């Protein structure tokens, strides 16, 4: 694996982790059946928070790709290959729902606030239901599967910290349940996912340093 691939993975996982915390921290929480909810939907904070979530998910496959590349010549590459495929498909199925949350609910909130009528907020349930919701849930389950496969691969690997994939797998398994809790719990969950992403970034960085040191040692011996 080249240093550029590793650096891309380290950068992607680190930034993704930070964004997973910022998303619930910035997102406004309120009674979404009232004009207070309309104000939250229409706010710049709502738009920014959900855009950060979109970027957080988008960066994940780049990190998983780097992990797959680091184990490409091992017998664990099949596990990481399917982890990468699951992650890519999972993100693809998840993002349309976030698009609806980001732009659809903001438009509904703005109109409801302009009309000073909470009746329009019932349309939020339309955005959050149906086929879009099913795809969203399937996408999150695939991301959980991806993180579990990564955790198994890292546990079996001699090159990475054995336990480094566990926090992210726990965080992704809890991604659906955390939606039913309040902001402090959701921020704590975002922090757990962030820790998982950063741990993966650290183990990738260590691989790069070890590879570089080995190359230096080999050159010294040749001299």
Image (cartoon, rainbow, N blue to C red):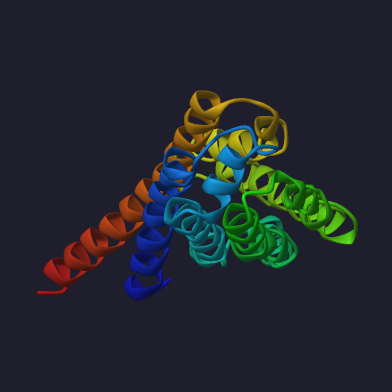
Q: Could you tell me which quadrant the C terminus lies in?
A: bottom left
Residue at 72%, 31% (x, y): give it: 177
- Dividing the picture into quadrants, the one containing residue 12 is bottom left
Q: Could you tell me which quadrant the N terminus lies in?
A: bottom left
Instruction: Inspect this view and state whether residue 113 appears.
Output: yes
Name the residue furthest right: 130
Instruction: Pinpoint residue 75: horizontal percent, then vertical percent.
Output: 66, 57
Instruction: Inspect this view and state whether residue 155 appears.
Output: no
Task: Give left or right: position of 118 versus 53.
Answer: right
Pick the residue in front: 35 or 15.
35
Residue at 17%, 66% (x, y): give it: 216
Instruction: Pinpoint residue 34: horizontal percent, then vertical percent.
Output: 65, 37
Task: Give left or right: position of 143 versus 190.
Answer: right
Pick the residue in front: 215 or 202.
202
Q: Is residue 190 above or below residue 223?
A: above
Instruction: Pinpoint residue 64: horizontal percent, then vertical percent.
Output: 55, 60
Residue at 68%, 48% (x, y): give it: 117
Instruction: Pinpoint residue 182: horizontal percent, then vertical percent.
Output: 58, 25
Pick the residue in front: 159 or 120.
120
Task: Give left or right: position of 138 versus 88.
Answer: right
Residue at 31%, 61% (x, y): give it: 211
């Amino acid at each position: 694996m080249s240093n550029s691939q590793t650096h891309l993975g380290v950068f992607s996982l680190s930034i993704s982790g930070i964004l997973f915390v910022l998303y619930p921290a910035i997102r406004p929480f309120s009674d979404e059946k009232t004009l207070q909810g309309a104000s939250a939907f229409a706010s710049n904070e709502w738009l920014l928070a959900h855009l950060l979530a979109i970027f957080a998910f988008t960066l994940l496959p780049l990190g998983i790709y780097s992990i797959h590349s680091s184990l490409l010549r091992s017998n664990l590459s099949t596990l990481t290959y399917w982890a990468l495929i699951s992650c890519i498909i999972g993100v693809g199925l998840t993002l349309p729902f976030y698009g609806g949350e980001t732009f659809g609910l903001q438009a509904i909130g703005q109109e409801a606030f302009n009309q000073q009528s909470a009746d329009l907020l019932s349309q939020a349930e339309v955005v959050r239901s149906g086929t879009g919701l099913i795809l969203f849930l399937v996408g999150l389950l695939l991301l959980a599967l991806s993180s579990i496969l990564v955790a198994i691969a890292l546990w079996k690997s001699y090159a990475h910290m054995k336990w480094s994939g566990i926090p992210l797998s726990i965080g992704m398994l809890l991604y659906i349940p955390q939606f039913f809790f309040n902001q402090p719990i959701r921020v704590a969950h975002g922090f757990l996912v962030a820790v998982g992403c950063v741990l993966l970034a650290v183990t990738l960085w260590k691989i790069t340093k070890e590879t570089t040191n080995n190359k230096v040692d080999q050159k010294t011996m040749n001299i």
